Image (cartoon, helix red, strand yellow):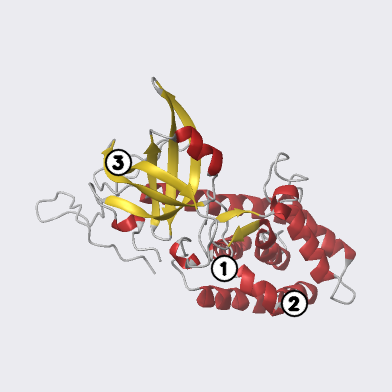
Amino acid sequence: MKSQFVKDLRLGDLVEDIFVVSRISVGYHDHGEYLRLRLADSSGKISAVMWQGATEAFESVRGGDLARVEGRVEAYRGELQLKVVYLCRIDSYEDLNPEDFLPKSRFSSTELLERLRQFVEEIQNKFCRSILELFLADEEFQNLFRRAPGGKMWHHATIGGLLEHTLWVTGLCRAVAPFYPKIDRDLLITGAILHDIGKVQELRYDIAFDYTNQGRLLGHVILGDELLRSYAAQVEGFPDELLMRLRHMMLSHHGDIERSPVLPMTLEASLLHYIDNMDAQINASIREMEKSSDPSREWTDYVNLLGRSLFMKPIPRWRGPDSNGEPNNSETEVESPD
């Protein structure tokens, strides 16, 4: 049973427990090779380094593996870092609790799914509504959908992250649609709810987040398109053009030809792409800002996928002029206007 968690580690602590190796790579120094690691559990992640035995460990441990780790918590550039002296892959999970290793969404999946059902009830197009009702009534799929992560590492990489991301994207589409009268709202909302359903099959989330064989060979865009067509086939008389437009949204939502079979070419597909990307990037940016345990830091580490660091100094909560006519930047929350 796991007893040491990342969030509880302190400078100088001796560590001897099991962690997910979420990232592993070889570095080089004057005396040979060393390992750069990212270790994780349900409470968070910590950087680690292994100076001795790097070659042997790298041959047996891969990203996504569970490993027994021994070492000591040290400080490096103002952050905690684990100096590893022993690293060994764990092959048997029988005595382990998966919930100890996978981070969870901070939101209740029951509440998120109920809100998604409410969005479906607003749909006026009978075919769009029928396909969504079939999706929600698929109990076996829903049990997986409400647990699946939104990604392996970059955005919404938590248990329940896919449902959270789906609801946020749908809610944003619902809010933005009235600004563009030419948008078909029902089509947009339907595409938003279904756009990432292929991730249920693309990712595994038993003891660690990783790709399935289907995910690696096909990807969630193709897997999602297959699921979409299977649901549409169950609705009698489902219009061919409506299915084509929904499939186009599914197949183009990444917005670039490197990751999508086609580029967005309808208003609904274009809006879905931009909102999907916005939610993913903002969620990932917030996660990068929350990594640091040093409250005095103003910048994140360099984020390779963004090509920059992020400024994370808290914004002062301005309350207005004080009695001397000077602004007051106390942390008092400002009420939102009606």
The quarter of the picture where residue 132 lies is: bottom right
Look at label 1 and name its amino acid.
Answer: Arg
Number of residues whose C-alpha sits closer than 10 Å to that of mark 1, classed few (under 14), some (14–19) or many (20 or more): many
Number of residues whose C-alpha sits closer than 10 Å to that of mark 2, classed few (under 14), some (14–19) or many (20 or more): some
- Cβ–Cβ under 8 Å for marks 1 and 2: no
Q: Quadrant of the N terminus?
A: bottom left
Look at label 2 and name its amino acid.
Answer: Leu
Lateral position of residue 49 relative to residue 222, left or right: left
| Residue 63 on image: x %, y % | 54, 46
Front residue of 87/194: it is 87
Seen as rendered, the residue at the extreme left is: 324
Q: Disc 3 designates what residue?
A: 298
Look at label 3 and name its amino acid.
Answer: Glu
Whether residue 25 is situated above or below residue 5 in the rendered picture: above
Question: Which of the two labelled residues, at mark 3 and mark 2, occupies the earlier sequence position?
Answer: 2
Mark 2 residue element? helix
Label of residue 225 in the image = none
How much space separates mark 1 and mark 2, taking CA atoms? 19 Å
The quarter of the picture where residue 78 lies is: top left
Q: Quadrant of the C terminus?
A: bottom left
| Residue 252 on image: x %, y % | 73, 49
| Residue 60 on image: x %, y % | 54, 42
Front residue of 229/174: it is 229
Mark 3 residue element? loop
Lateral position of residue 216 relative to residue 104, left or right: right
The quarter of the picture where residue 168 lies is: bottom right
Question: Which of the two labelled residues, at mark 3 and mark 1, occupies the earlier sequence position?
Answer: 1
Q: Residue at x 51, y 77 (%)?
A: 111
Q: Disc 2 designates what residue?
A: 134
Q: Disc 1 designates what residue?
A: 147
| Residue 319 on image: x %, y % | 22, 57
Whether residue 79 is situated above or below residue 194 in the rendered picture: above
